[in-house]
Image (cartoon, rainbow, N blue to C red):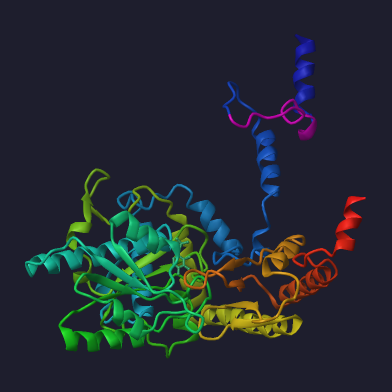
């Protein structure tokens, strides 16, 4: 008995790595029969996470990787809040509602207090809901006119994958305007070429994924106005403002892209991108309650009360939404403007500096889109390395600066891109530039894509 007690006491005092759990292999693909000490398991899990990339050095992502301590506190405090349960958490629901109205107002809704909108898990779900509203409204118009409604199409420029999903899931033909070497975005003329009576809507992107640029929403809206006058075909617009919805209102207030254009019926954005909220929140807002078909809204009574819901998921965490509310209140327009302005300045700085480092030509230099930059190898130059080689080398020092090829018709063109986020300071930009220089120096010495000379090849074999 005494002996046993001593063994137990000894194991309680064990160093975590010398413990029964960590000194052996932990199960990975099958559940163990028995429990483990929480602090042991915590260590095992934390250690696994250590091998992930460092998110703040990930210059590929649009999503937030930094938060004020207050946001972390709010996230911990809201662990139990289920966004769908508006009866149990009416105040969380009220905060969501306030965010909807603030965004409607930010996007110049003519009647911001009465618009409809909802939080979502991100822009992908928001886009799905916006697309569904376009599809349902188009079907209603077609049926009312006694016309067929079995061949819907949607027109867009180079879009994020969520619109490919929308098109496939709902059997909508996606008329995606391909890129050309002299045109990386949709233009009014390219849109009008593709419009017909089966077009459920046109979706310009404010902050194109591949190049960070804004598509010309106002010019497209005007072309569609003219098209209506010419043909009687009236095509609504939805703006994918995943990033731009939270940058343009603060840093480009003169740019007309939002509900100031009557043709823009709905807008989505990602709260967790330039909305500065933690991962897991997006928004979709309709211009007018008539633009959201009633059939898409379900009323649920089994949580107590009668609750309208329009979302793909049912239960969903509420913390991100509360944190979004915190940000809107905490920062105001001035705070968002200052943060994003710093991002633009850092992006423009990096664009100027990277252009000096080698045969790089900026295709986006941080002006006319979201805070970021994108470049390609200068045409006709053979530097002996590719942008993929540069990306690999940068990864050695932890930086993720993606290189990728563009979508059709520019599949042969590789570019590299940086998103400049809230937490990317000028000092970090300089540290990145140092590593970029080192990467290029290395590649100059060990030219990866130059075929080995016979002599060099021979020296490998001896
Ligand atoms: C990121 C992004 C999306 C998808 O948004 P999530 O919030 O990641 O679901 C859609 N469209 C554009 C333009 C984006 O940048």
Q: What secondary structure characterizes most of the magenta part?
A: loop
Viewer can see residue 12:
yes
- Depicted 330 relative to depicted 169: above or below: below
- Depicted 80 relative to depicted 354: above or below: above
Where's residue 34, x and y in %? 60, 22
The one nearer the camera, 156 or 460, is 460
Where's residue 381, x and y in %? 70, 80
Residue at (66, 72) in percent of width and height:
424
Q: Quadrant of residue 95?
A: bottom left
The one nearer the camera, 418 or 285, is 418
On screen, residue 432 versus residue 36, left or right, reads right
User: Residue farthest to the top?
Assistant: 1
Give the quarter of the figure containing the N terminus. Answer: top right
Where's residue 427, x and y in %? 74, 76
On screen, residue 168 versus residue 438, left or right, reads left
Which region is colored magenta? 15-29
Q: In which quarter of the image is residue 125?
A: bottom left
């Amino acid at each position: 008995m005494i002996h046993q007690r001593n063994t137990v006491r000894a194991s309680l005092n064990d160093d975590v790595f010398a413990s029964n759990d960590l000194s052996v292999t932990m199960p990975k693909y099958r559940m163990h029969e028995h429990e483990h000490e929480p602090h042991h398991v915590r260590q095992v899990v934390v250690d696994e996470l250590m091998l992930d990339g460092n998110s703040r050095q990930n210059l590929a992502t649009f999503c937030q990787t930094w938060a004020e301590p207050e946001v972390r506190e709010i996230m911990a405090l809201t662990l139990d809040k289920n966004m769908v349960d508006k009866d149990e958490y009416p105040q969380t629901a009220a905060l969501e509602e306030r965010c909807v109205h603030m965004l409607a107002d930010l996007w110049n809704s003519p009647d911001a207090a009465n618009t409809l909108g909802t939080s979502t898990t991100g822009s992908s779900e928001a886009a799905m809901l916006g697309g569904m509203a376009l599809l349902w409204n188009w079907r209603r118009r077609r049926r009312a006119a006694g016309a067929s409604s079995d061949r819907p199409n949607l027109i867009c420029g180079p879009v994020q994958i969520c619109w490919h999903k929308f098109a496939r899931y709902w059997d909508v033909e996606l008329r995606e305007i391909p890129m050309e070497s002299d045109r990386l975005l949709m233009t009014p003329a390219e849109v009008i070429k593709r419009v017909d009576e089966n077009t459920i809507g046109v979706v310009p992107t404010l902050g194109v994924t591949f190049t960070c640029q804004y598509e010309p929403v106002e010019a497209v809206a005007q072309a569609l106005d003219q098209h209506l006058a010419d043909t009687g075909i009236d095509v609504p617009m939805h703006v994918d403002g995943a990033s731009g919805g939270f940058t343009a209102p603060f840093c480009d207030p003169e740019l007309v892209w939002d509900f100031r254009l009557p043709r823009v019926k709905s807008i989505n954005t990602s709260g967790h991108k330039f909305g500065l909220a933690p991962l897991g929140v997006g928004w979709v807002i309709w211009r007018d309650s008539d633009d959201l078909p009633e059939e898409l809204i379900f009323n649920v009574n089994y949580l107590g009360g009668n609750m309208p819901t329009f979302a793909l998921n049912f239960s969903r965490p509420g913390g991100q939404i509360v944190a979004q509310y915190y940000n809107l209140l905490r920062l105001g327009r001035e705070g968002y403007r200052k943060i994003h302005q710093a991002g633009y300045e850092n992006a423009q700085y990096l664009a100027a500096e990277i252009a000096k480092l080698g045969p790089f030509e900026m295709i986006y230099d941080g002006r006319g889109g979201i805070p970021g930059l994108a470049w390609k190898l200068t045409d006709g130059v053979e530097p002996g390395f590719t942008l993929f080689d540069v990306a690999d080398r940068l990864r050695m020092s932890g930086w993720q600066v993606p290189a990728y090829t563009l979508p059709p018709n520019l599949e042969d063109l590789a570019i590299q891109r940086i998103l400049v986020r809230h937490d990317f300071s000028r000092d970090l930009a300089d540290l990145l530039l140092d590593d970029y220089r080192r990467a290029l120096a290395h590649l100059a010495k060990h030219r990866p894509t130059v075929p080995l000379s016979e002599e060099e090849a021979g020296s490998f074999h001896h």
